[in-house]
Amino acid sequence: MRVLSGIQPSGALHLGNFFGMMKRMIDYQEKHELFCFLVNYHALTSVSDSKLLRQQTFDAACDFLALGLNPDKVVFWIQSDVPEVTELTWLLSNVTGFGLLERSHAYKDKTAKGIPATHGLFSYPVLMAADILLFGGEKVPVGKDQKQHLEIAKDIAIRFNNTYGDTFVIPEPDIEDNFAVVPGIDGQKMSKSYGNTIEIFADEKTLREKVMRIKTDSTPVDEPKPIENNILFDIYSLFLNQREKAVLKERFLTPGLKYGEIKKELFGVIWEYFTPYRKERERLVNDRKYVLDTMKKGAEKARQTAVVYLERARHNIGLDYWHK
Ligand code: ADP
Ligand code: TRP
């Protein structure tokens, strides 16, 4: 099974990215053929500072490698190193209905939040479909926010195949219920663009501050605390197995629990959880050449697959005009 997914280097990666996509990809590398990439073309919809884009792209590569993505097992690359994806985007554009893109929640949400309504933002799902179809992705691990984008990709693949003959694999989303929507410290979906993240590799002081800022309700100390829609409970639970979660639930339901104390405890849990990876990340940041070489090699491998699908699409469309 070919499993494929991408992430935007549009800011520091956070717990939503980790549990919704990164950890699942890293776990899958043991049993599936994995393609993983950093979508810097997509990031152009929100990042216009070249220095920042370079830095964030490098940082995201270090994050993935430090967290255990093995570049010998996984094809891991930076989207713009395989620019064939932009050609496929154009080819797909012609089987993509305008109405399909107009219905995109992500587009509507982003423009409502003041992100300029550019053509790039509008056609974002077409580039994403190209990312998937160019590499024959069968299963795509993502958070719930990407569900509609996956439906659009599927729709585009079907329409292309119906129009030009069998060309692309039809992809399926892979969304894990427990991690479908990781809440941010304000209770909205945790997102780089909402300023509500807990970053995976924040320094100690920042991490502590972020955890202490998790929004809680005003239930008095001597009353049981609610479990439903409790942001603190939900974030803490990400780090627990079923049995540990049941214990935490019991603690919340027992009068006397102080949110402040749970926050201090949670800070310790998060800090410990990422400690081994933090050391590895520091090593990688200081070995820039290794990281850049690794990404280049990944792009070469990715391109070998990309050209096969792109040539097939060009042929089925009739762009190879010399062909009889
Ligand atoms: P962001 O919204 O922070 O910019 P991305 O759009 O780059 O994040 O998302 C990268 C991956 O991480 C996607 O698969 C996305 O669904 C997943 N993801 C992002 N935020 C969350 C979240 N809060 N909960 C679950 N998954 C998430
Ligand atoms: N749109 C995705 C996001 O914002 C990132 C992405 C781009 C992606 N291309 C992809 C995810 C292909 C899965 C497959 O999170």
Image: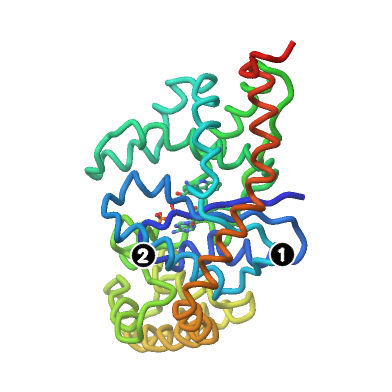
Task: Say whether marks 2 and 1 touch (CB < 8 Å).
Answer: no
Q: What amino acid is at disc 2?
A: Gln
Packing grade of label 1 (10 A; few <14, some 14-19, many >=20) is few
Please determine whether, in this image, residue 135 is positioned above or below residue 295. Answer: above
Q: What amino acid is at disc 1?
A: Lys
Please determine whether, in this image, residue 262 is positioned above or below residue 113. Answer: below
**Residue 238 location (% of width, % of height):** 52, 72
Task: Judge left or right: residue 299 versus residue 104.
Answer: right
SS at mark 2?
helix
Residue 316 numbered mark, or none: none
The front one of 290 and 205 is 290
Which residue matches tag 2?
A: 55
- Which residue corresponds to the image point at 63% horizontal and 29% vertical from the top-left? 157
Residues at marks 2 and 1, CA–CA distance in whole angstroms? 25 Å
Q: Quadrant of residue 259?
A: bottom left
The front one of 90 and 182 is 90
**Residue 168 location (% of width, % of height):** 69, 31
Task: Judge left or right: residue 66 versus residue 137.
Answer: left
Q: Quadrant of residue 138?
A: top right
- Which residue corresponds to the image point at 45% horizontal and 77% vertical from the top-left? 285
Please determine whether, in this image, residue 175 is positioned above or below residue 116. Answer: below
**Residue 101 location (% of width, % of height):** 43, 28
| Dot placed on the residue nearer the N-terminal end, 2 or 1 | 2
**Residue 68 location (% of width, % of height):** 61, 73
Residue 73 numbered mark, or none: 1
